[in-house]
Amino acid sequence: MPSNPLFAQRAFLYFWFSRICTTMANQMLMVAVGWQMYDLTHSAWDLGLVGLAQFAPVLLLTLVVGHVADRYDRRKVLALCLGGQALVALALIVASLMGWVGREHILLASVALGITKAFQMPTQQALTPLLVAPALLPRALAFSSSGSQFAIIAGPAAGGFVYVAGPHVVYAVCALLIAAGLLCMLGVRLVQTPSFSREPVSLHTLLAGVRFIWQRKPVLGAISLDLFSVLLGGATALLPIFARDILHTGPWGLGFLRAAPAVGALLMSIWLTQHPIQRRAGKTMFAAVAVYGLSTVVFGLSTNFVLSLVMLAIAGAGDMVSVVVRQSLVQLDTPDAMRGRVSAVNSIFIGASNQLGEFESGATAALFGAVGSVVLGGLGTLGVVALWMRLFPGLAQRERLVAESAENAAPDAPAGPVRR
Protein backbone atom coordinates (compact mmCIF):
# COMPACT_ATOMS: atom_id res chain seq x y z
CA MET A 1 0.00 0.00 0.00
CA PRO A 2 1.40 3.48 -0.80
CA SER A 3 2.65 5.44 2.19
CA ASN A 4 0.19 8.20 1.30
CA PRO A 5 -3.33 6.76 0.87
CA LEU A 6 -4.17 9.53 -1.60
CA PHE A 7 -1.90 7.90 -4.16
CA ALA A 8 -4.27 4.92 -4.26
CA GLN A 9 -7.20 7.16 -5.25
CA ARG A 10 -7.07 6.86 -9.05
CA ALA A 11 -10.06 9.09 -9.73
CA PHE A 12 -8.61 11.82 -7.54
CA LEU A 13 -5.25 11.64 -9.35
CA TYR A 14 -6.91 12.08 -12.76
CA PHE A 15 -8.74 15.08 -11.34
CA TRP A 16 -5.48 16.37 -9.83
CA PHE A 17 -3.65 16.22 -13.16
CA SER A 18 -6.56 17.94 -14.89
CA ARG A 19 -6.43 20.80 -12.39
CA ILE A 20 -2.68 21.20 -12.89
CA CYS A 21 -3.04 21.54 -16.67
CA THR A 22 -6.01 23.90 -16.60
CA THR A 23 -4.65 26.04 -13.75
CA MET A 24 -1.32 26.43 -15.56
CA ALA A 25 -3.18 27.43 -18.72
CA ASN A 26 -5.28 30.02 -16.89
CA GLN A 27 -2.24 31.52 -15.19
CA MET A 28 -0.43 31.82 -18.51
CA LEU A 29 -3.52 33.43 -19.98
CA MET A 30 -3.61 36.02 -17.20
CA VAL A 31 0.05 36.93 -17.66
CA ALA A 32 -0.39 37.36 -21.42
CA VAL A 33 -3.69 39.23 -21.15
CA GLY A 34 -2.36 41.55 -18.43
CA TRP A 35 0.86 42.39 -20.22
CA GLN A 36 -0.89 42.79 -23.57
CA MET A 37 -3.49 45.13 -22.04
CA TYR A 38 -0.83 47.25 -20.32
CA ASP A 39 1.18 47.38 -23.55
CA LEU A 40 -1.91 48.68 -25.36
CA THR A 41 -3.24 51.19 -22.82
CA HIS A 42 -0.63 51.76 -20.05
CA SER A 43 -3.61 52.12 -17.71
CA ALA A 44 -3.99 50.74 -14.18
CA TRP A 45 -7.75 51.27 -14.58
CA ASP A 46 -7.85 48.93 -17.58
CA LEU A 47 -5.91 46.28 -15.66
CA GLY A 48 -8.59 46.51 -13.00
CA LEU A 49 -11.32 46.22 -15.62
CA VAL A 50 -9.88 42.87 -16.73
CA GLY A 51 -10.54 41.53 -13.22
CA LEU A 52 -14.00 43.08 -13.09
CA ALA A 53 -14.88 41.56 -16.47
CA GLN A 54 -14.08 38.11 -15.12
CA PHE A 55 -15.93 38.62 -11.85
CA ALA A 56 -19.21 40.02 -13.21
CA PRO A 57 -20.37 36.70 -14.79
CA VAL A 58 -19.54 34.85 -11.57
CA LEU A 59 -21.78 37.24 -9.64
CA LEU A 60 -24.63 37.19 -12.14
CA LEU A 61 -24.67 33.41 -12.63
CA THR A 62 -24.17 32.29 -9.03
CA LEU A 63 -27.65 30.93 -8.38
CA VAL A 64 -27.79 29.19 -11.76
CA VAL A 65 -24.41 27.44 -11.58
CA GLY A 66 -25.11 26.10 -8.10
CA HIS A 67 -28.23 24.33 -9.34
CA VAL A 68 -26.39 23.00 -12.39
CA ALA A 69 -23.68 21.49 -10.16
CA ASP A 70 -26.31 19.86 -7.91
CA ARG A 71 -28.53 18.49 -10.70
CA TYR A 72 -26.14 17.29 -13.43
CA ASP A 73 -23.03 15.16 -13.76
CA ARG A 74 -20.27 17.42 -12.47
CA ARG A 75 -17.66 15.77 -14.68
CA LYS A 76 -19.60 16.68 -17.83
CA VAL A 77 -20.15 20.25 -16.62
CA LEU A 78 -16.40 20.63 -16.06
CA ALA A 79 -15.66 19.19 -19.50
CA LEU A 80 -17.93 21.81 -21.11
CA CYS A 81 -16.21 24.58 -19.13
CA LEU A 82 -12.79 23.47 -20.33
CA GLY A 83 -14.05 23.32 -23.91
CA GLY A 84 -15.21 26.93 -23.61
CA GLN A 85 -11.84 28.05 -22.25
CA ALA A 86 -10.07 26.37 -25.17
CA LEU A 87 -12.27 28.33 -27.59
CA VAL A 88 -11.34 31.60 -25.85
CA ALA A 89 -7.64 30.77 -26.18
CA LEU A 90 -8.12 30.01 -29.88
CA ALA A 91 -9.93 33.31 -30.41
CA LEU A 92 -7.06 35.20 -28.76
CA ILE A 93 -4.57 33.39 -31.03
CA VAL A 94 -6.43 34.53 -34.14
CA ALA A 95 -6.85 38.11 -32.86
CA SER A 96 -3.16 38.42 -31.99
CA LEU A 97 -1.93 36.91 -35.26
CA MET A 98 -4.24 39.12 -37.33
CA GLY A 99 -3.04 42.20 -35.47
CA TRP A 100 -6.48 43.57 -34.60
CA VAL A 101 -6.53 42.69 -30.92
CA GLY A 102 -7.43 45.71 -28.79
CA ARG A 103 -8.72 46.76 -25.39
CA GLU A 104 -12.28 45.70 -26.20
CA HIS A 105 -11.21 42.26 -27.47
CA ILE A 106 -9.26 41.56 -24.28
CA LEU A 107 -12.21 42.62 -22.11
CA LEU A 108 -14.59 40.46 -24.17
CA ALA A 109 -12.27 37.47 -23.78
CA SER A 110 -12.15 38.15 -20.04
CA VAL A 111 -15.95 38.09 -19.86
CA ALA A 112 -16.01 34.76 -21.73
CA LEU A 113 -13.42 33.31 -19.34
CA GLY A 114 -15.48 34.61 -16.43
CA ILE A 115 -18.56 32.75 -17.71
CA THR A 116 -16.70 29.42 -17.95
CA LYS A 117 -15.09 29.94 -14.54
CA ALA A 118 -18.49 30.75 -13.04
CA PHE A 119 -19.55 27.17 -13.78
CA GLN A 120 -16.13 25.60 -13.25
CA MET A 121 -15.31 26.74 -9.72
CA PRO A 122 -18.37 25.51 -7.76
CA THR A 123 -18.59 22.33 -9.83
CA GLN A 124 -14.91 21.57 -9.20
CA GLN A 125 -15.26 22.19 -5.48
CA ALA A 126 -18.39 20.06 -5.23
CA LEU A 127 -16.77 17.21 -7.18
CA THR A 128 -13.71 16.79 -4.93
CA PRO A 129 -15.53 15.18 -1.95
CA LEU A 130 -16.87 12.47 -4.30
CA LEU A 131 -13.36 11.33 -5.18
CA VAL A 132 -12.05 10.42 -1.69
CA ALA A 133 -13.36 9.19 1.66
CA PRO A 134 -14.41 11.98 4.10
CA ALA A 135 -11.46 11.34 6.43
CA LEU A 136 -9.07 12.02 3.55
CA LEU A 137 -10.71 15.27 2.43
CA PRO A 138 -8.52 17.83 4.29
CA ARG A 139 -5.40 15.99 3.14
CA ALA A 140 -6.82 15.77 -0.40
CA LEU A 141 -7.60 19.49 -0.44
CA ALA A 142 -4.05 20.30 0.64
CA PHE A 143 -2.56 17.93 -1.94
CA SER A 144 -4.86 19.28 -4.63
CA SER A 145 -3.79 22.78 -3.71
CA SER A 146 -0.12 21.78 -3.94
CA GLY A 147 -0.69 20.70 -7.54
CA SER A 148 -2.55 23.91 -8.31
CA GLN A 149 0.19 25.98 -6.70
CA PHE A 150 2.83 24.20 -8.76
CA ALA A 151 0.84 25.18 -11.84
CA ILE A 152 0.51 28.74 -10.55
CA ILE A 153 4.30 28.83 -10.19
CA ALA A 154 5.10 27.26 -13.54
CA GLY A 155 2.31 28.98 -15.46
CA PRO A 156 3.25 32.65 -14.94
CA ALA A 157 6.98 31.97 -15.22
CA ALA A 158 6.46 30.04 -18.46
CA GLY A 159 3.98 32.61 -19.71
CA GLY A 160 6.44 35.44 -19.10
CA PHE A 161 9.24 33.72 -20.98
CA VAL A 162 7.05 32.46 -23.84
CA TYR A 163 5.54 35.94 -24.25
CA VAL A 164 8.88 37.04 -25.67
CA ALA A 165 7.91 35.01 -28.78
CA GLY A 166 4.56 36.77 -28.93
CA PRO A 167 1.21 36.60 -27.13
CA HIS A 168 -0.18 34.24 -29.76
CA VAL A 169 2.43 31.63 -28.74
CA VAL A 170 1.31 31.87 -25.10
CA TYR A 171 -2.32 31.41 -26.10
CA ALA A 172 -1.41 28.39 -28.24
CA VAL A 173 0.34 26.68 -25.31
CA CYS A 174 -2.71 27.47 -23.15
CA ALA A 175 -5.02 25.78 -25.66
CA LEU A 176 -2.87 22.63 -25.61
CA LEU A 177 -2.81 22.52 -21.80
CA ILE A 178 -6.58 22.93 -21.58
CA ALA A 179 -7.01 20.08 -24.07
CA ALA A 180 -4.79 17.86 -21.88
CA GLY A 181 -6.86 18.79 -18.83
CA LEU A 182 -10.04 17.90 -20.68
CA LEU A 183 -8.68 14.43 -21.53
CA CYS A 184 -7.79 13.82 -17.86
CA MET A 185 -11.26 14.92 -16.75
CA LEU A 186 -12.88 12.43 -19.12
CA GLY A 187 -11.02 9.65 -17.27
CA VAL A 188 -12.43 10.52 -13.82
CA ARG A 189 -14.66 7.87 -12.19
CA LEU A 190 -16.47 8.69 -8.94
CA VAL A 191 -15.59 6.89 -5.71
CA GLN A 192 -18.77 7.95 -3.90
CA THR A 193 -22.29 8.07 -5.32
CA PRO A 194 -23.47 11.68 -5.74
CA SER A 195 -26.74 12.81 -4.19
CA PHE A 196 -28.38 14.84 -6.95
CA SER A 197 -30.92 17.45 -5.95
CA ARG A 198 -34.44 16.62 -7.19
CA GLU A 199 -36.17 19.65 -5.72
CA PRO A 200 -38.16 21.74 -8.21
CA VAL A 201 -36.34 24.92 -9.14
CA SER A 202 -37.73 27.83 -7.14
CA LEU A 203 -36.52 30.94 -5.39
CA HIS A 204 -36.42 28.92 -2.17
CA THR A 205 -34.06 26.29 -3.61
CA LEU A 206 -32.00 28.91 -5.45
CA LEU A 207 -31.29 30.68 -2.15
CA ALA A 208 -30.66 27.47 -0.19
CA GLY A 209 -26.88 27.87 -0.38
CA VAL A 210 -27.07 31.43 0.95
CA ARG A 211 -29.24 30.35 3.90
CA PHE A 212 -27.01 27.38 4.66
CA ILE A 213 -23.88 29.53 4.93
CA TRP A 214 -25.65 32.28 6.89
CA GLN A 215 -26.81 29.78 9.50
CA ARG A 216 -23.32 28.35 10.02
CA LYS A 217 -21.32 31.22 11.46
CA PRO A 218 -17.88 29.54 11.42
CA VAL A 219 -18.28 28.84 7.69
CA LEU A 220 -19.57 32.38 7.06
CA GLY A 221 -16.68 33.82 9.05
CA ALA A 222 -14.07 31.75 7.21
CA ILE A 223 -15.18 32.62 3.69
CA SER A 224 -15.88 36.29 4.46
CA LEU A 225 -12.46 36.61 6.13
CA ASP A 226 -10.87 35.26 2.97
CA LEU A 227 -13.02 37.63 0.89
CA PHE A 228 -12.03 40.85 2.62
CA SER A 229 -8.40 39.96 3.26
CA VAL A 230 -7.66 39.16 -0.39
CA LEU A 231 -10.00 41.90 -1.65
CA LEU A 232 -8.00 44.49 0.27
CA GLY A 233 -4.56 42.90 0.28
CA GLY A 234 -4.34 41.43 -3.22
CA ALA A 235 -1.79 43.05 -5.52
CA THR A 236 -1.97 40.73 -8.53
CA ALA A 237 -3.53 43.22 -10.94
CA LEU A 238 -0.81 45.78 -10.17
CA LEU A 239 2.14 43.45 -10.72
CA PRO A 240 2.73 44.70 -14.30
CA ILE A 241 3.16 48.20 -12.82
CA PHE A 242 5.52 46.99 -10.08
CA ALA A 243 7.49 44.92 -12.58
CA ARG A 244 7.99 47.70 -15.11
CA ASP A 245 7.92 50.97 -13.19
CA ILE A 246 9.09 50.13 -9.64
CA LEU A 247 11.29 47.02 -9.88
CA HIS A 248 12.42 47.83 -13.45
CA THR A 249 12.12 44.38 -14.99
CA GLY A 250 10.40 42.89 -18.04
CA PRO A 251 7.85 40.17 -18.85
CA TRP A 252 10.12 37.49 -17.35
CA GLY A 253 10.19 39.45 -14.08
CA LEU A 254 6.41 39.76 -14.12
CA GLY A 255 6.20 35.99 -14.53
CA PHE A 256 8.36 35.46 -11.45
CA LEU A 257 6.38 38.00 -9.43
CA ARG A 258 3.10 36.28 -10.32
CA ALA A 259 4.63 32.91 -9.47
CA ALA A 260 6.15 33.95 -6.13
CA PRO A 261 2.93 33.67 -4.04
CA ALA A 262 2.44 30.19 -5.43
CA VAL A 263 5.95 29.17 -4.36
CA GLY A 264 5.06 29.92 -0.75
CA ALA A 265 1.64 28.35 -1.16
CA LEU A 266 3.14 25.21 -2.68
CA LEU A 267 5.61 24.74 0.17
CA MET A 268 2.83 25.29 2.71
CA SER A 269 0.43 22.92 0.94
CA ILE A 270 3.10 20.19 0.87
CA TRP A 271 3.57 20.67 4.61
CA LEU A 272 -0.19 20.55 5.22
CA THR A 273 -0.50 17.38 3.14
CA GLN A 274 1.88 15.59 5.49
CA HIS A 275 0.85 17.50 8.65
CA PRO A 276 -2.85 18.40 8.39
CA ILE A 277 -4.21 20.92 10.87
CA GLN A 278 -5.31 18.93 13.93
CA ARG A 279 -5.73 21.59 16.62
CA ARG A 280 -6.49 25.31 16.97
CA ALA A 281 -7.77 25.50 13.39
CA GLY A 282 -9.52 28.86 13.84
CA LYS A 283 -6.63 30.69 15.51
CA THR A 284 -4.23 29.22 12.98
CA MET A 285 -6.34 30.66 10.18
CA PHE A 286 -6.43 34.14 11.73
CA ALA A 287 -2.67 34.12 12.33
CA ALA A 288 -2.04 33.08 8.72
CA VAL A 289 -4.20 35.89 7.33
CA ALA A 290 -2.37 38.40 9.55
CA VAL A 291 0.94 37.19 8.09
CA TYR A 292 -0.58 37.65 4.62
CA GLY A 293 -1.49 41.27 5.39
CA LEU A 294 1.87 42.15 6.94
CA SER A 295 3.89 40.68 4.07
CA THR A 296 1.69 42.60 1.61
CA VAL A 297 2.61 45.87 3.33
CA VAL A 298 6.33 45.08 3.10
CA PHE A 299 5.95 44.13 -0.58
CA GLY A 300 4.25 47.44 -1.32
CA LEU A 301 7.14 49.38 0.23
CA SER A 302 9.91 47.28 -1.35
CA THR A 303 12.02 48.49 -4.26
CA ASN A 304 14.22 45.37 -4.24
CA PHE A 305 13.24 42.58 -6.62
CA VAL A 306 14.41 39.74 -4.37
CA LEU A 307 12.72 41.16 -1.26
CA SER A 308 9.52 41.59 -3.25
CA LEU A 309 9.65 37.94 -4.33
CA VAL A 310 10.18 36.77 -0.74
CA MET A 311 7.28 38.86 0.59
CA LEU A 312 4.94 37.57 -2.11
CA ALA A 313 5.99 33.99 -1.27
CA ILE A 314 5.26 34.53 2.44
CA ALA A 315 1.88 36.02 1.54
CA GLY A 316 1.12 32.94 -0.56
CA ALA A 317 2.00 30.61 2.33
CA GLY A 318 -0.33 32.47 4.68
CA ASP A 319 -3.12 32.47 2.14
CA MET A 320 -2.78 28.71 1.62
CA VAL A 321 -3.52 28.01 5.29
CA SER A 322 -6.68 30.12 4.99
CA VAL A 323 -7.70 28.29 1.80
CA VAL A 324 -7.36 24.80 3.33
CA VAL A 325 -9.28 25.74 6.49
CA ARG A 326 -12.05 27.45 4.50
CA GLN A 327 -12.46 24.69 1.93
CA SER A 328 -12.43 21.99 4.61
CA LEU A 329 -15.15 23.74 6.61
CA VAL A 330 -17.32 24.30 3.53
CA GLN A 331 -17.03 20.76 2.15
CA LEU A 332 -17.15 18.79 5.41
CA ASP A 333 -20.09 20.70 6.86
CA THR A 334 -22.23 20.55 3.69
CA PRO A 335 -24.47 17.65 2.52
CA ASP A 336 -23.58 16.47 -1.00
CA ALA A 337 -27.00 17.38 -2.43
CA MET A 338 -26.29 21.03 -1.54
CA ARG A 339 -22.58 21.21 -2.27
CA GLY A 340 -23.08 22.80 -5.69
CA ARG A 341 -25.20 25.66 -4.35
CA VAL A 342 -23.01 26.21 -1.30
CA SER A 343 -19.87 26.06 -3.46
CA ALA A 344 -21.45 28.57 -5.86
CA VAL A 345 -21.91 31.05 -3.01
CA ASN A 346 -18.37 30.29 -1.88
CA SER A 347 -17.20 31.00 -5.43
CA ILE A 348 -18.72 34.47 -5.20
CA PHE A 349 -16.50 35.15 -2.20
CA ILE A 350 -13.48 33.72 -4.00
CA GLY A 351 -14.26 35.60 -7.19
CA ALA A 352 -14.86 38.83 -5.33
CA SER A 353 -11.58 38.45 -3.46
CA ASN A 354 -9.64 37.76 -6.68
CA GLN A 355 -11.29 39.37 -9.73
CA LEU A 356 -13.11 42.15 -7.86
CA GLY A 357 -9.96 42.61 -5.78
CA GLU A 358 -8.07 43.26 -9.02
CA PHE A 359 -10.60 45.95 -9.92
CA GLU A 360 -10.29 47.46 -6.45
CA SER A 361 -6.49 47.50 -6.78
CA GLY A 362 -6.68 49.21 -10.17
CA ALA A 363 -9.16 51.81 -8.92
CA THR A 364 -7.23 52.66 -5.74
CA ALA A 365 -3.95 52.71 -7.67
CA ALA A 366 -5.45 55.29 -10.01
CA LEU A 367 -6.14 57.44 -6.91
CA PHE A 368 -3.18 56.73 -4.61
CA GLY A 369 -0.61 55.11 -6.88
CA ALA A 370 0.39 51.45 -6.96
CA VAL A 371 2.46 51.60 -3.76
CA GLY A 372 -0.24 53.41 -1.79
CA SER A 373 -2.89 50.97 -2.99
CA VAL A 374 -0.94 47.88 -1.87
CA VAL A 375 0.19 49.30 1.48
CA LEU A 376 -3.30 50.52 2.41
CA GLY A 377 -4.73 47.14 1.36
CA GLY A 378 -2.30 45.23 3.57
CA LEU A 379 -3.11 47.44 6.56
CA GLY A 380 -6.81 46.94 5.83
CA THR A 381 -6.28 43.17 5.94
CA LEU A 382 -4.77 43.43 9.42
CA GLY A 383 -7.77 45.47 10.52
CA VAL A 384 -10.16 42.84 9.12
CA VAL A 385 -8.39 40.10 11.10
CA ALA A 386 -8.83 42.02 14.37
CA LEU A 387 -12.49 42.78 13.63
CA TRP A 388 -13.40 39.24 12.49
CA MET A 389 -11.96 37.68 15.66
CA ARG A 390 -14.56 39.71 17.57
CA LEU A 391 -17.44 39.16 15.13
CA PHE A 392 -16.92 35.38 14.76
CA PRO A 393 -15.71 34.02 18.11
CA GLY A 394 -16.92 30.54 17.12
CA LEU A 395 -14.46 30.50 14.22
CA ALA A 396 -11.64 31.81 16.41
CA GLN A 397 -12.29 29.02 18.92
CA ARG A 398 -12.75 26.29 16.29
CA GLU A 399 -10.47 23.45 17.38
CA ARG A 400 -10.78 20.73 14.71
CA LEU A 401 -11.71 20.56 11.03
CA VAL A 402 -12.75 16.91 10.70
CA ALA A 403 -15.49 15.35 12.80
CA GLU A 404 -14.35 12.46 14.97
CA SER A 405 -16.60 10.01 13.11
CA ALA A 406 -14.93 10.89 9.81
CA GLU A 407 -11.46 10.59 11.29
CA ASN A 408 -12.24 7.09 12.47
CA ALA A 409 -13.35 5.98 8.99
CA ALA A 410 -11.03 3.75 7.02
CA PRO A 411 -8.72 6.13 5.17
CA ASP A 412 -8.54 4.20 1.93
CA ALA A 413 -12.03 2.76 1.74
CA PRO A 414 -14.77 4.44 -0.29
CA ALA A 415 -17.61 5.87 1.80
CA GLY A 416 -20.23 4.80 -0.71
CA PRO A 417 -20.75 2.42 -3.61
CA VAL A 418 -18.43 2.87 -6.56
CA ARG A 419 -20.08 4.64 -9.49
CA ARG A 420 -18.63 3.72 -12.87
Image (cartoon, rainbow, N blue to C red):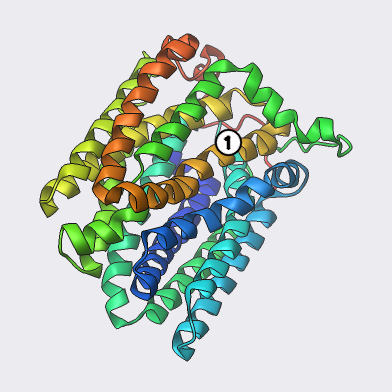
Q: In front: 327, or 246?
A: 246
Above or below, 180 against 77 in this view is below
Say whether residue 131 is visible: no
Q: Residues within 10 Å of mark 1 (few under 14, many from 20)?
A: many
* Side of 411 relative to 61 (left or right): left
Q: Of all residues shown, which one is farthest toward the front?
A: 367
Q: In front: 9, or 335?
A: 335
Q: Residue at x 36, y 13 (%)?
A: 280
Q: In front: 397, or 408?
A: 397
Q: Residue at x 69, y 36 (%)?
A: 341
* Side of 157 relative to 324 (left or right): left
Q: Of all residues shown, which one is farthest toward the bottom?
A: 98
Q: Quadrant of residue 336?
A: top right
Residue 257 screen position, x and y as percent: 25, 55
Q: Quadrant of the N terminus?
A: top left
Say whether residue 127 is visible: yes
Q: Of all residues shown, which one is farthest toward the right?
A: 200
* Side of 252 relative to 53 (left or right): left
The residue pinned by badge 1 equals 346
Q: Residue at x 14, y 46 (%)?
A: 302
Q: Residue at x 52, y 48 (%)?
A: 10
Residue 86 screen position, x and y as percent: 56, 70
Residue 314 screen position, x and y as percent: 23, 38
Q: In the image, what residue type sits under mark 1?
A: Asn
Residue 140 screen position, x and y as percent: 46, 36
Above or below, 281 against 258 in this view is above
